[in-house]
Image (spheres, rainbow, N blue to C red):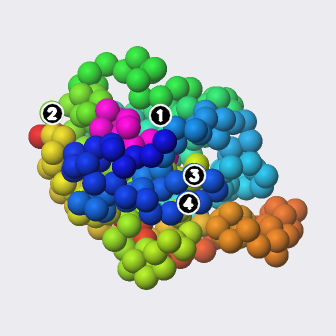
């Protein structure tokens, strides 16, 4: 199967062309708006998010240990919450793709009444053990009430959503938000300098884990078309643990040296969990308000 006769969910034009085959999965690029997505017709996405996803040097996931790999992001997350508070004082927050609830706990510490959902059963179980509210399921299986959240956060979320349900997700988020509610997205940016310079070698092109890729321009267009006003679309640099960086390097280049270093770092957590901020400018933070 191919996406060549499929309408792009972002611009609705029928202009997909083959872009890259990676991990036996074909990625397509829209010639009109630049949106890149995978043909996932032969992929069982539920299998990707199995019990090993958050703690794995062997499965599809990029995390060695989610909790420790995310800790370097704490100050970034707090800064994002400060930016949201300036435009939306309400405190009811839903985190999409919350994993083990690491961000939910930070949001609660910042006076939000935060909860999340995640498709991964082991993520919600770990969240429960840590006293964080994360429901197992997706946006549609969880019984959220319309207009019940002031803020929805979707950090590292939309790159995991298949193109055929991207629009459904953005519309559902709109119905769950109160009027003037805020949607905050962090995702990779195909128009970043790094992505444009290294093109098909960009390390985030990682199907089946990453299957949908926006640019700053086309995500703005997509949000505006689906009932949001975009307040901010800015570049964001992320912080990572050293073990996560080498695990990503291995998944990107498949070099056994990176794998050996990752496994070494996993055995030496004081070194492996050392935090680095990577100034590669290929992620974006988009803050949008429900119209
Ligand atoms: Zn398009």
Which residue is the extreme one toward the left?
Answer: 291
Q: Indicate which label's residue lies in the foreground, 4 or 1.
A: 4
Q: Given contact means CB atoms under 8 Å apart, are the residues at marks 2 and 3 in contact?
A: no
In the rendered structure, are the residues bearing label 4 and label 3 in contact, judged by CB atoms less than 8 Å apart? yes
Of the pair 11 and 274, the residue shown nearer to us:
11
In three-dimensional space, the C-alpha distance between marks 2 and 3, rounded to whole angstroms, equals 39 Å
- Position of residue 102 measured from the top left corner of the image (x, y, whole percent): 56, 46
Residue 239, picture quadrant: bottom right
* Magenta stretch, residue numbers: 160-169
Residue closest to the eye, 82 or 204: 204
User: Is residue 24 in sight in this rendering?
Assistant: yes
Mark carried by residue 116 = 1
Q: Earlier in the sequence, mark 4 or mark 1?
A: 4
From the viewer's perspective, tell me whether residue 276 is left or right of residue 290. right
Is residue 57 covered in magenta? no
Label number found at residue 215: none
The answer to which of marks 1 and 3 sits earlier in the sequence is 3
**x and y percentages locating residue 192 in the rendered image:** 37, 74
Q: CA distance from mark 4 to mark 1?
A: 33 Å
Question: Which residue in the protein does label 2 denote?
Answer: 179
Residue at the image position 56 percent from the left and 69 percent from the top: 203
Q: Which residue is mark 4?
A: 21
User: Is label 1 in a helix, a strand or a loop?
Assistant: strand
């Amino acid at each position: 199967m191919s996406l060549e006769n499929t309408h792009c969910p972002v611009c609705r034009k029928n202009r997909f062309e083959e872009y890259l085959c990676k991990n036996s999965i074909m990625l397509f690029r829209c010639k009109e708006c630049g949106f890149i997505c995978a043909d996932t017709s032969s992929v069982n996405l539920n299998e990707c998010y199995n019990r090993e996803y958050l703690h794995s040097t062997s499965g599809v996931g990029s995390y060695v240990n989610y909790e420790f790999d995310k800790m370097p992001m704490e100050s970034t997350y707090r800064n994002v919450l400060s930016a949201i508070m300036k435009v939306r004082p309400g405190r009811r927050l839903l985190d999409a793709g919350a994993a083990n609830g690491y961000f939910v706990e930070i949001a609660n510490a910042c006076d939000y009444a935060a909860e999340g959902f995640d498709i991964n059963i082991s993520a919600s179980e770990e969240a429960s053990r840590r006293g964080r509210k994360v429901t197992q399921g997706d946006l549609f299986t969880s019984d959220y009430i319309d207009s019940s959240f002031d803020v929805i956060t979707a950090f590292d979320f939309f790159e995991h959503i298949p193109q055929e349900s991207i629009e459904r997700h953005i519309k559902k988020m709109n119905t769950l938000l109160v009027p003037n509610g805020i949607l905050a997205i962090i995702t990779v940016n195909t128009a970043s300098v790094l992505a444009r310079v290294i093109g098909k070698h960009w390390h985030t092109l990682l199907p089946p884990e990453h299957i949908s890729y926006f640019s700053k321009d086309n995500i703005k267009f997509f949000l505006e078309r689906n009932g949001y006003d975009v307040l901010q679309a800015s570049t964001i640099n992320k912080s990572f643990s050293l073990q996560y960086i080498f695990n990503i390097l291995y998944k990107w280049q498949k070099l056994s040296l990176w794998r050996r270093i990752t496994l070494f770092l996993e055995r030496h957590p004081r070194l492996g969990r050392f935090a680095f901020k990577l100034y590669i400018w290929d992620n974006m933070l988009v803050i949008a308000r429900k119209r």
